[in-house]
Amino acid sequence: MSEDLLARITESIVGGEPESVVALTRKALESGLQPLEIINQGLVAGMNIAGERFTRGEFFLPHLLIAAKGMQGAMELLEPELGARQQVHEAVGTVVIGTVLGDIHEIGKSLVGTMLSANGFKVYDLGVDVPKEDFVARVKETGADLLGLSALLTTTMIGQREVIEAIVQAGIRDQVKVIVGGAPVSQAWADEIGADAYAANAMDAVEVARRVLM
Amino acid sequence: MSKKSSSVPEYFHVDFEPIGRRVENNAGKTLLAAAQTAGVQLVSLCGGVGSCNSCRVRLVSGELSTPTREEQDALGADDLAKGYRLACQAIPLTDVKIDIPPESLTAPQRLQIEGQETFIEPDPVVTAFDVQLAPPTLDDLRSDVARIRQVLDDLGIACPVIRLPVLEGLSGRLRAQSWTARLVLRGDEVIAGLPQDSDLLGLAVDVGTTKLAAYLVDLEKGNTLAKTGRMNPQISYGEDVVSRIAYTINNEEGRKLFQAKLVEAINDMLAELHNQTSTSSEQVVEAVVVGNTAMHHLFAGLPVRQLGEAPYVPAVADPMDIPASEIGLALAPGAYVHLPPNIAGYVGADHVAMLLATDVWDSARTVLALDIGTNTEISLATGGRLLSCSCASGPAFEGAHIHDGMRAAPGAIERVQIVDGEVRVHTIGSQPAVGICGSGILDAIAEMVAAGVIDSRGKLQKDNPLVREEDGVVEFLLMPAESAGHERDVIVTQKDVSEVQLAKGAIRAGIEILLEAAGVAHDAIEEFIVAGAFGTYLDIRSAVRVGMFPTLPVDRFRQVGNAAGTGARQMLISAERRQATAEIVRRVEYIELTTHPNFTNEFIKAMSF
Ligand code: B1M
């Protein structure tokens, strides 16, 4: 029964039914399943399948966004439970991510965040329109290994450089790898501003994150 | 009936509306043949064999041959009952009047200058007085200006202001014109001293991010004398508004350069308009320029940096009157350029002009109006409210970021049909295909969805015979190299599909959010107005089929061409219309999508087919 529930959560993630993902997650909690089990064997399993299909060219942006929406909805239920039970997610790395100051484009950044967390990273998502000081403070506070900066506007890309300069000034440049992304961003831009890596899409971001931490 | 008096007439007159082309068509020849003779560009995808319905026209008056089998199949009883026929099948039996629906018409000219003529009572902001001045003599040594003051005083106009640019030419003119003149006043200012009886002209310009449109208007009669268009010369510095703003941030001289480029292009169009009408720049005593907020600012030489960074506020939203001489526009030396108000950083004076021209703003009905561009402005009038938003739809419909995308120019595929697994295209100017423009990519995607080539999430179906996989890239063949003008395949890639999904998703999400904010159901939309260049040529049925527009009866949609240009012309000839814009901006409730909690949901939903 409980295994069946987890499998159905996975299916609903892959099948693009975010409402049933949330409903099933609630049911799973009520039936006594552990939040971590639900995350790893239900949600993450589903996101991984969706991610693989995306990489293979079988899934497209809408699939991935809808899958991520299910995962995000379920996590809203699960996070408080995790906290209450003082369970921690074993993480392959800790990421602070956000969209830079002046820019509110959130969809791409959140997708990257979701894929990273589905792949075992502990993700602190600072949201959008994030001032450089906040990035610096949160990296220090969480001891993050990775800093992800998203920018969708030609006019706000410059914010990625400013954040990098700020972490240099704060003396923590060596502690954290910086990944940049977003539609107008390129490898050349990443090189120019001294980022450690550029990622073209959410799945690429997972690859790149693993690579830079090796 | 034709003028021939014999019992079997040799030809009939065919009157094509709304373009007003009339042609003599030999008896027995189809309407399509008549259109070809007239140079009226009807879409004919199947090549005139009656197997598609792209040349659908409507009989307004007169008599046509009975509908053929093909017509019955392609049109159905409903359409036939309404008078719709296929031009390639129907043969006139009497003189006929034919209405060509916009989707059946393909015009070679793709500059954004077509717009509806205005029927507004002229009441311009300038007035003219034909005067006779007393010439100076040794006994009358008053200055030239004192003489002008005198005649105006006699007419009951006190203490006019005359600025330096006007003064510079005035003395010579008065003498050359034997002390007669047509004094042009704007408020309490004398702005020109033309030869008596000169026509007073005005210039209306729509400064689009991509295209410019200019109209030369008779200020007293209100009619448009000539119009022309150009590409916006700033394009080479950035495709969209934000890239241009970025350019001015990174290049100090950028702002000045952009203003100079615009002014130069407008002067260039003016010269062409004068040529067409045998008029001169001195007669152009007033101008109205509309554009999106960034174009407005760049034209006026205002800073734009704050438009490129959150929270995107305009430097100026109020209406402005700028002396033409200050920015180098080649009008009468004392002329002013009126810039109507902006609504927000991404909803500019062009949208205000569009709302004015279409009367959306004071409509008692529920009307939705939008202008699709890289930023799509949308307004909804309902129950006395007027709600507006701007959604960032991106440049897919301008052909950018599309594998074989191009702007609407000769050789661009603008219509696509897939009939029984066979792809039919129509190109602009009927030239060999070299790429796809916005209306073409929209059609292509709509047809691909209908034909099951792509599924509801936008995935190309590899098992479909029209889809191929080459080097791991899945693509749809629109036109094989043999038939293309540049001997390369014209294709639609998976990425193209995604780009269209992003664009149409953003537009639909904006529409949904406005409807939701006003508590209006789709069905309650009584009229759906589509303005702008792409909006003129897109096939409404395709836009509905891909889900960019809500499903409504086709007759609720109205494609109005360059309504911003029409609004600019109205403001040019009518002070009252100009004042109405203040009311428009006062009433608009601007909905900011950037902070709207539902946007993302609606957007993701609207990306599917
Ligand atoms: C850390 O490491 C990484 C690694 C990879 C990373 C990464 C970080 N971040 C992203 N990636 C990468 O992975 C992601 C997943 O694969 C990808 O993320 P993307 O974000 O690229 O992809 C998303 C999954 C889907 N894509 C998107 O979500 C963006 C789509 C488009 C349509 C778009 C949207 C939806 C929106 N917009 Co905006 N918007 C456009 C876009 C035009 C288009 N057709 O693409 C764009 C980006 N917008 C633009 C503009 C101008 C604006 N927008 C604005 C507003 C909005 C909406 C609110 C309407 C909405 C955002 C909603 C939201 N909450 O996010 C305004 C500003 C907002 C602001 N303050 O920042 C406004 C300024 C104007 C306006 N009309 O309001 C344009 C930028 C042009 C330019 N040259 O810079 C634009 C290209 C459209 C256009 N007009 O041409 C990769 O880039």
Image (spheres, rainbow, N blue to C red):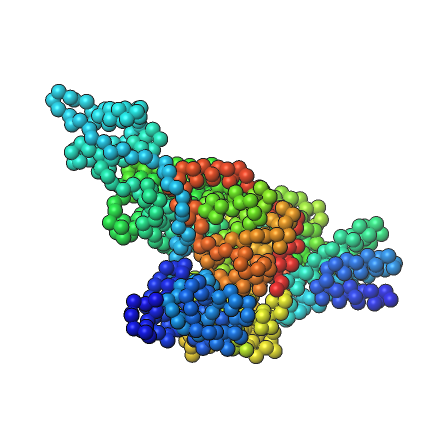
Image location (x, y in percent) of residue B360: 51, 46
Task: Decide which of A105, A155 is in the foreground and name it.
Answer: A105
Task: Decide which of B7, A133 is in the foreground and name it.
Answer: B7
Image location (x, y in percent) of residue B349: 46, 44
Residue B39 in the figure: left or right of residue A188: left
Task: Decide which of B219, B410 is in the foreground and name it.
Answer: B219
Q: Is residue B354 above or below residue B430?
A: above
Q: Which residue, as the protein is rendered here, is positioned at the far top?
A: B139
Residue A151 in the figure: left or right of residue A143: left
Residue A179 in the figure: left or right of residue B234: right
Is residue B152 among the parts visible in the rendering? yes
Of the 4 image quadrants, the one containing the N terminus of chain B is: bottom left
Image location (x, y in percent) of residue A160: 57, 50
Q: Is residue B173 above or below residue B358?
A: above
At 50% from the left and 77% from the top, the residue drawn is B69
Quarter holding residue A211: bottom right
Q: Which residue, as the protein is rendered here, is positioned at the far left?
A: B138
At 41% from the left and 42% from the top, the residue drawn is B571
Image location (x, y in percent) of residue B32: 40, 71
At 24% from the left and 49% from the top, the residue drawn is B278
Residue B603 in the figure: left or right of residue B290: right
Of the 4 image quadrants, the one containing the C terminus of chain B is: bottom right
Quarter holding residue B284: top left
